[in-house]
Image: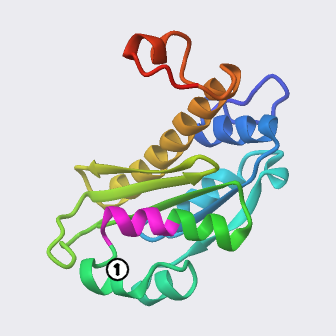
């Protein structure tokens, strides 16, 4: 993979894009990982200049650690198991809160080779929690264990990049709906 003009950031790295965007915004990031087991954090910390952005992360592979370290409600885990959209959201929010970061990014899912708790291999949830709320994305991934895990990292970073971009757009428009959107919708919201 090539580097930028300063020979520092990997060109095309989704992590480089989010690190750069967060640095420009003077905001911080924390990660909470289950199925990716540290790959997400590793992809972020390989970017030069990340120390001003990345607060740290949790690898909570065991279900009990999702509750104890990341703050996921124990009753939620008991009822739905660790591979669930609400668990992913709670992981992202817990990481953000526990690490004192502006943004939390989380992964949970089934990498394989066998299904887990009735959930199929390749079912993954990535979640982001930020200053304006949280979002979860469900992924249905094909391929082997390594592919599922590496794709989960890319998709988590992509989701974060989209949320940062949306926050930038909202700030540029003065914190309200994009130009003409509210009026066209007839909401008149300000």
Q: Quadrant of residue 22?
A: top right
Q: Is residue 18 left or right of residue 64?
A: right
Q: Quadrant of residue 120?
A: bottom left
Q: Is residue 76 left or right of residue 66?
A: left
Q: Nearer the viewer, residue 114 or 155?
A: 155
Q: Position of residue 101 (x, y in %)?
A: 72, 60
Q: Residue at x 61, y 52 (%)?
A: 43
Q: Position of residue 66 (x, y in %)?
A: 48, 81
Q: For residue 89: magenta?
A: yes
| Label 1 Cα neighbours within 10 Å, binned few <14 / some 14-19 / many ≥20 | some
Q: Residue at x 62, y 60 (%)?
A: 41
Q: Position of residue 103 (x, y in %)?
A: 64, 54
Q: Nearer the viewer, residue 115 or 135?
A: 135
Residue sticking out furthest to the left: 118
Magenta segment: 83-91
Q: Nearer the viewer, residue 151 or 79?
A: 79
**In which quadrant will I find the C terminus?**
top right
Q: Position of residue 168 (x, y in %)?
A: 66, 29
Q: Which residue is mark 1?
A: 76
Report the number of discs. Answer: 1
Vertical arrangement, residue 155 with respect to residue 76, above or below: above
């Amino acid at each position: 993979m090539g580097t930028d003009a300063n020979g520092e950031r990997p060109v095309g790295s989704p992590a480089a894009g989010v690190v750069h965007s967060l640095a420009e915004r003077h905001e911080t990031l924390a990660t909470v990982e289950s199925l990716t087991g540290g790959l997400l954090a590793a992809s972020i910390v390989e970017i030069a200049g990340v120390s001003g952005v990345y607060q740290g992360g949790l690898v909570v592979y065991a279900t009990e650690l999702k509750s104890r370290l990341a703050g996921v409600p124990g009753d939620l885990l008991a009822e739905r198991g660790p591979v669930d959209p609400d668990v992913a959201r709670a992981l992202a929010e817990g990481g953000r809160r526990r690490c004192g970061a502006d943004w939390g990014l989380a992964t949970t899912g089934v990498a394989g080779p066998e299904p887990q708790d009735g959930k199929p291999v390749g079912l993954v949830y990535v979640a982001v929690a930020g200053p304006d709320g949280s979002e979860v994305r469900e992924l249905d991934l094909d391929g082997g264990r390594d592919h599922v895990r590496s794709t989960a990292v890319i998709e988590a970073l992509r989701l974060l990049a989209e949320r940062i971009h949306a926050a930038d757009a909202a700030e540029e428009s003065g914190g309200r709906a994009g130009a003409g959107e509210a009026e066209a919708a007839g909401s008149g919201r300000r």
